[in-house]
Image (tube, helix red, strand yellow):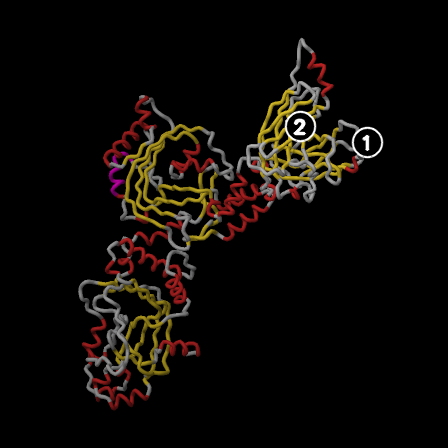
Amino acid sequence: MNETEKKFMKYLKLDYGLQYKDRSFIHTEPLIHEGQLKIEEYTKIHIYEPTKENQTSTWDIIPIRFQTLECENIEHPSDYLPREYLKLIIPVLKITYVGNLLNSFKSYAEKSDINELCQHFLAETVLVGGGLIIRNASNFKDKSKLDILKAHMIWTIDKTSLKHKYKKSFEKTSGDYVNQLFSYEKFSVIAYEKVIPAFTKLDEKLLNSHEIPADWSASINKRLVPGITSFHKEQDINYWLINNITTNLPNWIEKYHMENGLLVTQNGLKCSKEKAIEFLCEPEFKFIESTSLKMFHIKNQIELLMNINRIDINEKQVFEINPFALLDLSDKEVDAIACNIIQEQLKIQINTEKNKFKVSNQFKNVIKKALKSKKPYTELINIFNKYGHYFCKNYILGKCLESVCYSYPELPTELLKIFQKPKELKERDELIEIWKIFQSKFNVNAFSGDRSVVKSDNIERWLNENNSTYPETWYVVNRSKLIPIWELLDSNIQEQIRELIKNEERILMTGEERIGNEIKYHRIEFDTPLRSNKYHIIGSVVTIDYKKTNLTVKFRLMDCYGFFAIIEDHKNLNDITYSGLKICWALIGVPLNLDYFNYELSRIKLDSGNKKIEMSKKSVSDTIKITKSISQNLIFATIFEFPSTNFEPTIEVIISTSTSRQINYTLINHKFEDIEPWLENKQDPVLFEYYLKWYIIDISGYGSLFWNSNNNLELRSAYIPIPLRENSDL
């Protein structure tokens, strides 16, 4: 033996003698040396469960055959396994050690009588590992609870023995213990496979001098497990787990990708490539054992998608609120009738309110990164294409028989209405009758889960064959409680995503453009292209130090990359040079439409509205009511929409008075003289109508976000810092 093997042998005391006491062995002192050590891996598990009847135990061989004295002089507490306990022994190694007797034992044998000599044994082959116990196993009235405990043990042992990190349900201490066991960090002798009397190692002459009966020299080759009483029976693992449906749970979780999201594609739903969560323990489950017939009218592509993928029809609204699933199926009409027999056996529930799983760190990190980008929608779409658009919280396993009719024969209207009306039947005779009528009237095939056809005359046999006796044949027959996958994330991240997908206008950009050399046409480019040109630009021409001017700016030719600003003057501006001016602008739009978001600007409150204005004179006064609760530090911005005519107005907005509830303003058309003759034509008067879109922008606490002004937005007005204005053809 090498040094490592010697330490291993000494640690397990394989060279020690053994003495019997209370259905166990006690180590005495070293009796052998110079042995050969053989180590083998061992994978079989042995179960000892309570039994009502007294069993013959292997331990009984020793006191009967050898008339042992129970070693009263050796202190050793009784370590019986209580009668009502169940024990698993988990060997990881099978070790054989065969050596030669020490001279000290030979000297002892020469001086001892036969009774003393027969008290000493040697363990030639032992099982090394550990054990797990279920307390009060015989008191379990609910078999399913005991099955769960059994399954927990087997899951842990199986996964750990395969050198995988086990992540399903198990008490942490036990889980750690089994991991240590299979990494050889914590183990001991748990069973004796071959025990021999120590005297059999003596030479023949000394052995004959004691006149030991021949049958006493036979080795004990039956397994001896310390502490096991005659009220415990060794059980085969397969028999022990028979009809234990719970043991299938990890396989179902893996097979049906319950840790993954569901991805909407043109060809239906499929599981995502990446896992969204990791179970810390098994999800909740309960047995159902229910058979029903479900019939409903499929009217559109979404309902067809749900039927094919066995999604509860009540989940339809979930598919209509996820903007990241870009597949639009809602407008595609379908006219079909589904008739399905569902055998429900087991319901698996993933409770997102309890700490039974954790969200993938990688998933959380990529979401956070996407939310910080300026194009979060594109980033999130790419992420959800990997992790799924939805997460399913409820799965029902069992079997089903599905049939769909896409074209109707000439059926009486009343009969057709009966089949189109949603129904759910649970009475066996009634559901069989309706199902057979459906098959005959519509002449369709019914397919089982393996896509084999079940004929009408075989329906009863199919129903009888599919029961809880064959859980390994179950599959998903219904998915319900689908949620957008981002609802698995922390509440603050959920709120950020909800803000992104709100169908409401936000301020998304602000900017400044210096005016030089009296150029009146300016092309302003965005740093990032937008998804569309469905946005508004508001802005004003101000001085370098942000004092207002009487110049009017109009915004035109808006596209995904930028827009044009056109400057007009309507008064004598000899005292202001263009080189001392700048255009300050802001972009307003719906983030989802533009695929652009700015979190700092998104916190700014907006109120908006539309008005129809008839400009039959040079100036018109009006009032706007403020409907939202907004502070008095605000900006009033206007956009004019007008028909394409030869008389494009130049309108100035002047605020007369304002309060926190309303704004009184006057509109002045500085090109009124162009349209005045047409208004005075009594024979064919022309109406000049404009549509005013207004925004009230609350910039309390956000003044520095507007044009880098450090709150110097010309705050000479009591409530309105700068009246922003825009005239645009929209």
Q: Is residue 27 left or right of residue 613?
A: left
N-term-proximal mark, 2 vs 1: 1
Q: Nearer the viewer, residue 369 or 255?
A: 369
Q: Residue furthest right?
A: 574
Regarding residue 561, the answer to whether it shows in the image is: no
Identify the disc placed on residue 133.
none
The quarter of the picture where residue 200 lies is bottom left
Q: Nearer the viewer, residue 545 or 398?
A: 545
Marks 2 and 1 in Cβ contact (< 8 Å):
no
| Residue placed under numbered mark 2 in the picture | 728
Give the structural element (helix, strand or loop) at label 1.
loop
- Which is more foreground, mark 2 or mark 1? 1
The quarter of the picture where residue 670 lies is top right
Q: Which residue type carries mark 2?
A: Ser
The quarter of the picture where residue 599 lies is top right
Give me the residue at 43% from left, 78% from top. 2
Residues at marks 2 and 1, CA–CA distance in whole angstroms: 27 Å
Give me the residue at 58% from left, 42% from top. 603
Give me the residue at 38% from left, 39% from top. 310
Bounds of the magenta segment: 455-464
Q: Which residue type carries mark 1?
A: Asn
Regarding residue 328, the answer to whether it shows in the image is: yes
Identify the disc placed on residue 574.
1
| 478 inside magenta stretch | no
Q: Is residue 515 left or right of residue 107?
A: right
Q: Measuring from the top left, give residue 250's x and y in whole percent.
A: 37, 53
Q: Measuring from the top left, give residue 694's x and y in whole percent.
A: 61, 30
